[in-house]
Image (cartoon, helix red, strand yellow):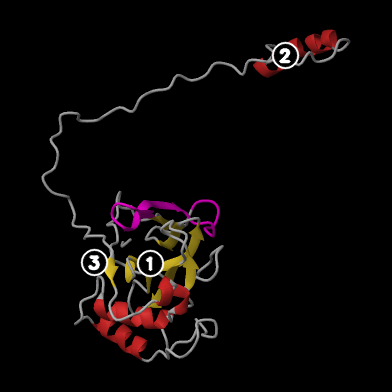
Amino acid sequence: MHRSRLALAAGLVLPAALLAGGCGDPGDLRGAGSTPTAEAPTRLWPKLPPPSAPAEDYGTIESLPVKGVDVPGGDLRKVNPVTVAKADFDENPGMYSRSDAVYRQTAENLAACDTTVTDDSRDSSEAECPVLKAYYRDLTGDGKDDLIVGIRLARGHAENLDIRAYAVEKRQLTQIMEMGDAVLGVELAGHEVIVRAVSGMPGYEYRTVWSWDSHQKTMLPTTDEIVRSPNAPKGKTSRKPEPAASARPVPSPGDSPSTSAGTSASASPSGSR
């Protein structure tokens, strides 16, 4: 009967251990085995000519000024977030046409918001005002707090939360991020905004990381991936998931999407599919 490789190895190690037992472990460095050889990426179709135009129009992601809102001393904490949301949504509707029913209904809901109510006392669950509690975090790296606002869109729309971020650029209130989606949760990590959103594949979700880009002067979706949902049931799903697209359109302030309820952040209160 042949001994297994594991048993044979154990038989060889035991006598060696007994021999070394009297003198103890010398503490010498021991080899960890051979190291796999690193391989460079293999380029496919090296003679493929460059495209003359992008496959899809993702829109232009750029910073947008918000007119009509003063920021005393450049401190965004001194500005009412509802006032900012009203002015920006009216001036910069994003992906929504002004004739669109969702835009009109959301604009009406924003008009009903009481700007005299402080952000700390406003209940984010109130249906009257679609503006959620604001959060503050330095997203641009200039040492000053920027403003993150969530706006619940009118009911019946698949993209149910519009997330916008604002900074003060050259004494001007400026929108530096705007996206919308069916959001599962939002987190702040360092200078980044992480958005988790619903996926069409059962048991999976989208995870988009928005980071400040000093050249574009705006937040860009630097990482956009589909991952296994932490709340997904273990084991195989009962039905076969639908095939996922290999790439998703990237949200943008000019032509962008929106986010939802669950919000978590390590800071003080804070693309399209």
Q: Inspect this view and state whether residue 151 appears.
A: yes
Magenta highlight range? 212-236
- Of the numbered discs 2 and 1, the one sitting upstream in the chain is 2
Please state, as top left, top right, bottom left or bottom right, where the N terminus lies in the image: top right
Query: The residue under label 3 is which amino acid type?
Result: Gly
SS at mark 1?
strand
Distance, label 3 to label 2, CA atoms, is 63 Å
Q: Closer to the camera, 112 or 182?
A: 112
Residue 140 occupies which quadrant of the picture?
Answer: bottom left
* Residue 28 numbered tag: 2
User: Upstream in the sequence, badge 3 or badge 2?
Assistant: 2
**Residue 157 location, x and y as percent?**
32, 76
User: What residue sits right under mark 3 in the picture?
Assistant: 254
Q: Name, please, the residue furthest toward the left.
A: 52
Give the CA distance from mark 1 to mark 3.
Answer: 17 Å
Residue 236: mark: none
- Mark toward the start of the polypeptide (1 vs 3): 1
Residue in the image at 80% along x and 9% along y:
15
For residue 205, side relative to residue 2 (left or right): left
**Above or below for 204 versus 254:** above
Q: In this view, does 216 lie above or below 71?
A: above
